[in-house]
Each structure stands twice: as structure tokens, then as C-alpha cells.
Amino acid sequence: MTQMALVIDLNVCVGCQACVTSCKEWNTSGESGSLADLNPYDADPSGTFFNRVQSFEAGSFPNAETIHFPKSCLHCEDPPCVPVCPTGASYKRKEDGLVLVDFDRCIGCKYCAWACPYGARELDEARKEMTKCTLCVDRIHDENLSERDRQPACVLACPTSARLFGDIHDPQSVVSKAIEERGGYQLMPEWNTRPANHYLPRVPTAASGCGGDACSCKTAGSSTDDAGRAPASLDAQLERGELHLASMATRIG
């Protein structure tokens, strides 16, 4: 059976939110209808999003780093949200493996949200209906679009190509190859939901933060370097390629 899914490369996601905004724009104007944004500029805003990017710090000084973690419905192969729905509004399609919601049958009871261990369901407060990522089902099967454009909006919008889309049951697909070659993994496999979406793990890098071997301020902030020599000027370090423009900008002014 076909199982369409996303594979997200955590090495190159920069947390730019392009996937979030493109998802919101497309789905608001697509089959899912208007997605509510209530009091977006007040102290207690409420909005409906199919895709979110969570950012957090990992590691410790001097090897700390920021990780950007996109999250949406994982289109599980054994979705717990489907059997708990009292009206049958939540269902899984055989032709592409997508987990979808029939809005005409949804009563907003939130049973699916309680059953989902990933927090992927959201109640649209204006419509009182449960919503979620559809993998842009109204795009990926639209024969009026070019082959390139028959992908989720978030995939097309990603500037770093951190998001891949395809059939994970096809061993020749780009997503299957990425999972096999780079050790793609599922979230919380202990729940036995068999998430279709996978993540490509981050590859550890050498210490490059403040205090690391590659840190340009290691000498610029001291009166002498490790060999007892006076530190070179910023211009000299930049000319020799020892100083990155980004790190220089944080210390000028």
C-alpha cells in the first residue's frame, strides 16, 4: 500500500518558519477552509496551524546549539485518532495512506486530540472542528499542476530543502533512500502507531562555539594568545580568514 509522508532533515532546518506560513496560506485558501486566528496581536492569541516549528537549546557551553524541530501530523500507519472518533470523521485513506478529517462529520469532541500522542490535532475555535495536516491532499493529486508543484506547500517553500516528500513504501523513492542511507527515525516508536513521517538525525559537529578551537574570540578577547603573542587586529584576522563576519559583527560597535 502506498504511504505518502514527509522526511525532515534536522541538519539543515534553520527555523525560518517558511513552512509554517506557506502551510497556513495554502490551507486557508484550500479545501480545509479558513483557519481561525483569534486576537492574533493581543496578550492571549489563538490560532489554528497544521505545522509548527519548535526550537530549543541542546548541549552545554561551549558546545551548545539551537535545534529547530518541525512538527505536524505524522500520518501514522496505525493512527490512534481514527478508532476513537465517534462519528467516523477521522479516517485513513487506502490510496495514499493519509489520515484526514471529514469536516461535515466532525463535531469537535476532541477525542482524536486526546488519543494522539504527538499533539498534532488542533481545534479550530471559529468552526469548532478538529483540524490537522493533510499533506496538501488538494495539491499532490491535482493533475492540473506540474509534477514539481504536486508537493505539499511546506516542501516547496523550504529554502534549505530540509523537507522531502514521497512514498516511504517505495524503496526507490527519495524519502525511502534518505531514511535508509541516513538512519531516518520515527517519533516515539514505543506507542506502536508507526508514524509515516520520519526525521533525519543531526550529525555531531566539532566544537565551534565560543571557547572552542574554531572560536575567533578566543584570542581577540585576551591580551595574549596561547603562545604569548599579542592578538592580531580584527582587520588582520579577517584578512587571514581567521574571523567570520558574523562573529565580528557581534563585537563591533
Image (cartoon, rainbow, N blue to C red):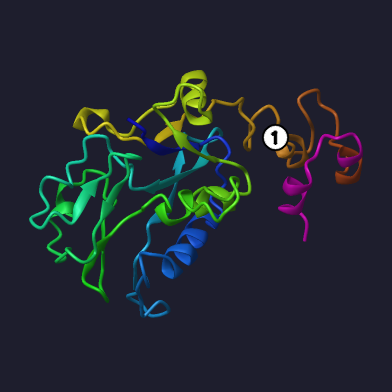
- Which residue position is annotated with label 1? 215
Q: Please, which residue is most extreme toward the left here?
A: 86
Secondary structure beneath disc 1? loop
Q: Quadrant of the N terminus?
A: top left
Q: Which residues are magenta?
A: 238-253
Figure label count: 1
Q: Is 41 in front, or is 96?
A: 96
> Relative to 120, is 175 above or below?
above
Residue 195 lies, in percent from the top left, at: 30, 35
Locate residue 8 relative to residue 210 in the image: left or right: left
- The residue depicted at 78 percent of the width and 56 percent of the height is 252
- Residue 250 belongs to magenta span: yes
Locate residue 81 relative to residue 169 in the image: left or right: left
Residue 90 lies, in percent from the top left, at: 20, 52
Q: Is 59 in front, or is 181?
A: 181
**Looking at numbered disc 1 in the image, what kind of residue is underneath it?**
Cys
- The residue depicted at 32 percent of the width and 34 percent of the height is 187
Q: Quadrant of the C terminus?
A: bottom right
